[in-house]
Amino acid sequence: MVPPKPDPIQEIYQREGRRVFATLVRVLGSFELAEDALHNAFVAAAEGWPREGIPKNPVAWLVSAGRFQGH
């Protein structure tokens, strides 16, 4: 039996989520806003990346998406 392929978005979350969150805290100036922005960025990634593909720099994409969601 072949194991299921790991979800790339989940892998990025596990590997880079703390870094994205820390950057959003610095950019937005609030843990609460950064938490919401992180969540919204990953929701947007889960909706868009399967259609558009994972960007070359997913961390930058997530920070940018989170920053615009957080304002």
Image (cartoon, rainbow, N blue to C red):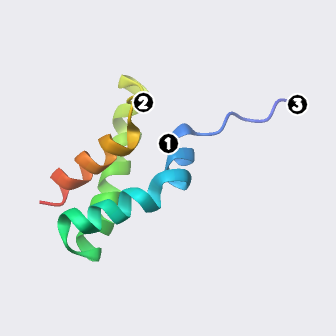
Q: Which residue is mark 3?
A: 1
Amino acid tagged 1: Ile
Amino acid tagged 3: Met
Residues at discs 2 and 3 in contact (Cβ within 8 Å): no
Residue at x 72% of width, y 35% of height: 4
Is 41 left, or right, of 53 in this rendering? left
Distance from the alpha carbon under mark 2 to that under mark 1: 8 Å
Q: Which residue is mark 2?
A: 54
Residue most extreme to the left: 71
Q: Residues within 10 Å of mark 3 (few under 14, many from 20)?
A: few
Which element carries disc 1, helix, strand or loop?
A: helix
Q: Which residue is mark 1?
A: 9
Residues at discs 2 and 1 in contact (Cβ within 8 Å): yes
Q: Who comes first in sequence, dot 2 or dot 3? A: 3
Amino acid tagged 2: Ile
Distance from the alpha carbon under mark 3 to that under mark 1: 24 Å
Q: Is residue 20 above or below residue 6?
A: below
Residue most extreme to the bottom: 31
